[in-house]
Image (cartoon, rainbow, N blue to C red):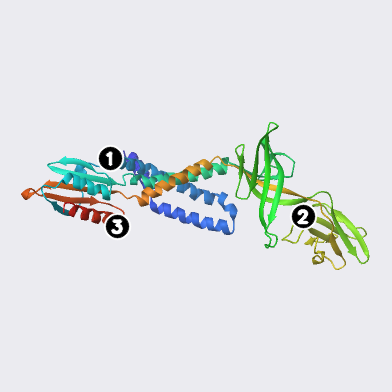
Amino acid sequence: MSASSSDIRLFSWLGRQLTSIRLTVFLLLILAVVAVVGTVAFPGIYYQSWFLAPLGLLALNLLACLVEGLPQAVKKVARPFTGEMALALPERGRFTWPGDAEAATLAQEALRRELGRPRREIIDEKEVFFYRRGRLRPLGPYIVHLALVLILAGGVVGKFWGIEGRVLLQPELPVSSINLEGPQKTLPLAFQVRLDRFQVLYYEEGGGTPKEFRSDLTFFQDGEEKARAVCRVNEPVTFGGYTFYQSSYGAMPQGAIPVQVSRGNKRQVLELFLRRWVRLPESEFQFMAVRVEANLQGHGPAVQLAYRSGSAHPQVFWLLQKQPELAEPHGAFRLALGPLNLQYYSVLQVKQDPGVWWVYLGFILILPGLYLAFFRPSQRWAVVLKKGKGGRWEGRLLGASPRGRETFAAHTERLLARLQGGAS
């Protein structure tokens, strides 16, 4: 018996801790600090245990509150508001009407105009007209809890069971796989995607800043064309259960990159290829093309070069086709970039997130939950009529509201004014 009582006390203590608002606030503070650190310095922290652990505890906290409180909230909602319950409400004011007044009609009309259509019961020779607003309010906080749990669950499902990768598309070259995070990781697709055309539009006075870039895509399955779509920034395309986002783009040289190297009166043309060192004839100097841009900050075509002398550490600089004088890697050289045959390529981010519908459902639920919790307080009113001395009608206005007292007071004041002047 002692062990059993001890276990009951332990479970009761755990239940109180899991449903504690202090635990919720504490976990939210921890997550806020970790989020700031992750945003500013360490993005990888979001995948570490010291972020996932408090996130899991928060989900457990929300579930515990949901399991404990939701059944009670459902009982409150299901419990009918009766005339006997209405008679127990606190009194808010009194009024009298002449004995020949149509009291029932006046009371119903006053309540209907201010609040809504009331119910009516006769209890101990008293006519009771009563009305309840915010019946579903007790469900509001638990709908919010459920919504947050769904959002967290959707994030976890998307993280551990979702797919995220990238695909590089060159014009007219269909691709049937995506590159996942990590070295040499690819995922085959059940379809092919082809880049038909890529376009970049620049701001006229923006230093070469792209205004828009778009990829015209065609999807194939089993050798047949299935769909065509245009993918822009913030306008993703969905096909075959995957969503394609326009991520970035670049230019790829078709063939060699001609760079003219002048030393005194001697001129030599080097044919460079990306990421390959080429030695300058009759010297110890080597050059390599690192990157190519079709329009570098509005200055036109450019190539990023690296050069070194022997085994020395390489130096990196940009060589502009229209302004070659800006590149002087070595006092003995003068460089010029020859004509380039460039072709744009498009980089798309590819996602498949099975938890996204959980997240959508959570966001859909959170709105009515917040409305019920904060903007639909539980309020109850009653008008009680009884024949008094001299045959006059004696009336009382009753009402109660645990929240939203300012709104309740305004309704009560206007309702009492209607009742007091109802038969005049």
- Please say whether residue 51 is visible from this viewpoint: yes
> Which quarter of the figure has residue 336?
bottom right
Rendered location of residue 241, percent (x, y): 60, 38
Which is more foreground, mark 1 or mark 3?
Answer: 3
Pick the quarter of the image with the C terminus: bottom left
Between residue 45 and residue 174, name the one nearer to us.
174
Q: Secondary structure at mark 1?
A: loop
Q: Residues within 10 Å of mark 3 (few under 14, many from 20)?
A: few
- What's the residue type where badge 3 is placed? Glu
Q: Which mark is residue 406?
A: 3
Determine the CA span between mark 2 and mark 3.
Answer: 67 Å
Q: Which residue is mark 1?
A: 79
Rendered location of residue 316, percent (x, y): 78, 61
Pick the quarter of the image with the N terminus: top left
- Please say whether residue 316 is visible from this viewpoint: no
Determine the CA span between mark 1 and mark 3.
Answer: 26 Å
- What's the residue type where badge 2 is placed? Val
Between residue 362 and residue 338, name the one nearer to us.
338
Q: Is residue 134 above or below residue 325?
A: above
Relative side of 181 to 416, left or right: right
Between discs 1 and 3, the one toward the N terminus: 1
- What's the residue type where badge 1 is placed? Arg
Q: Residues within 10 Å of mark 2 (few under 14, many from 20)?
A: many
Q: Which mark is residue 292?
A: 2
> Which quarter of the figure has residue 85?
top left
Determine the CA span between mark 1 and mark 2.
Answer: 72 Å
